[in-house]
Image: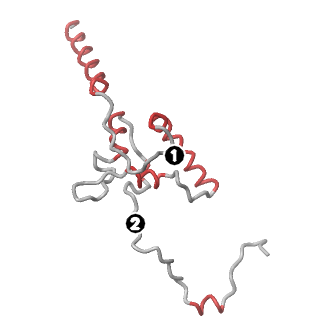
Amino acid sequence: MRLLAAFLLVLTLGVAAAPSLAGPPEVPKAKGEKCLAEPADMRRNHMSMLLHRRDATMHQGVRASANGLKACLDCHAVSNAEGQPVGIDNDKHFCRVCHDYAAVQVDCFDCHNSRPEAKKASSEPVADVMPPEATESQPAVQPEGAK
């Protein structure tokens, strides 16, 4: 019985040490020249940065940001053989490489898109969806207290 317990203990320790023996994961190279922070800092603190950005967006209404999740995806997208960005369901996805290694679930993409948005074909302004006669006949609605 002791021999079986010792064997199971050695087997468990060997399996637990296997990821560290394999070395760190090979992270795909980003497309940009510089990240928001040094790689070691990003590895340690990216979740805090994303949570801070989420709070600023949700609680303070700060939407436009060069350091949001969209910017991360634009720079760190990994493409498949056809040249299309892979989604979180693919084990080559930038976030999954480290998160799978660390056995940490990525839940950002339960709500957010895991691929970068397609670039718009034109920089033309979007046309007004309301016909001109509708805007001329009705005064603009202003919030209460506005002058």
79 lies left or right of 31: left
Residue 50: which disc? 1
Q: Are marks 2 and 1 in contact (CB under 8 Å)?
A: no
Residue toward you, 93 or 82: 82
Q: Residues within 10 Å of mark 1 (few under 14, many from 20)?
A: some
How was the colour assigned to the protein in this rendering? secondary structure
Q: CA distance from mark 2 to mark 1?
A: 23 Å
- Percent position of residue 34, x then y: 46, 46
Mark 1 element type? helix
Q: Residue at x 30, y 23 (%)?
A: 16
- Percent position of residue 115, x then y: 37, 56
Q: Residues within 10 Å of mark 2 (few under 14, many from 20)?
A: few
- Picture quarter containing residue 28? top left
- Picture quarter containing residue 12? top left
Q: Earlier in the sequence, mark 2 or mark 1?
A: 1
* Quadrant of the drawing holding the C terminus: bottom right
Mark 2 element type? loop
116 lies left or right of 129: left
The kind of residue tagged 2 is Lys
What is the number of callouts on the image?
2
* Quadrant of the drawing holding the N terminus: top left
Vertical order, 135 against 72 (above or below): below
Q: Which residue is mark 2?
A: 119
Judged from this view, the residue extending furthest toward the top is 2
Q: Residue at x 32, y 48 (%)?
A: 93
Q: Residue at x 46, y 54 (%)?
A: 71
- Mark nearest the camera among 2 and 1 is 2
The kind of residue tagged 1 is Leu
Q: Residue at x 53, y 54 (%)?
A: 66
Residue 136: which disc? none
- Percent position of residue 69, x then y: 47, 52
- Percent position of residue 92, x then y: 28, 46
